[in-house]
Image: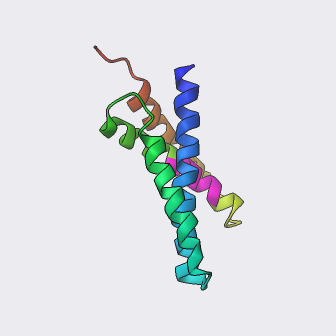
Amino acid sequence: MLEFKTIGLFLITAVAEIVGCYLPYLWLTQGRSVWLLLPAGLSLALFAWLLSLHPTAAGRVYAAYGGVYVFVAILWLWAVDGIRPTLWDWVGSGVALLGMAIIMFAPRSA
């Protein structure tokens, strides 16, 4: 059960980070409203708070989170940017998720 909670929390965290970065991207590259920076800042604050909810060492959480971020970014590529991921995008995401699982769920001595 801990694994599902961890992965779910990572997925929500990744969406918060991507939204927090995507909104300024829209402002900078597409001339959208500067007011997008406000929800972007809130989203990035949410991202940082969500990372703090994991009960393990911060460095381990940050390292493992990167794997889930890669996967969610590929989903974002497809869902938001409208670009269908390639086989290699999926393979790379799978490798990143495997790395996350090893880092977060490998047995450790107390």
**Residue at the image point whose x is 38% and y is 37% from the top:** 61
Quarter holding the C terminus is top left
What residue span does the magenta drawing correspond to? 69-76
Q: Position of residue 4 (x, y in %)?
A: 58, 27
Name the colour scheme. rainbow
* Number of on-image labels: 0
Most common SS among magenta residues: helix
Going 60% across and 86% down the picture, which residue do you hit? 31
Q: Is residue 102 above or below residue 84?
A: above
> Is 36 in front, or is 99?
36
Which quarter of the figure has residue 54?
Answer: top left
84 to the left or right of 20: right
- 4 versus 82 height, above or below: above
Which one is nearer the viewer's eye here, 84 or 21? Answer: 21
Residue 82: x and y in percent read 71, 66
Residue drawn where x is 43% and y is 24% of the image: 105
Judge from the rendering whether residue 57 lies leftward or rightward of residue 55; answer left or right: left
Q: Would you place residue 80 above or below residue 5 in this image?
A: below
Is 26 above or below relative to 65?
below
Q: Residue at x 56, y 80 (%)?
A: 34
Q: Is residue 46 visible?
A: yes
Residue 84 makes an appearance in the image: no
- Return the residue found at the far bottom: 31
Image-based side of 59 in relation to 73, left or right: left
In percent of width and height, residue 37 lies at 53, 71
Residue 68 point in image, percent of width and height: 51, 43
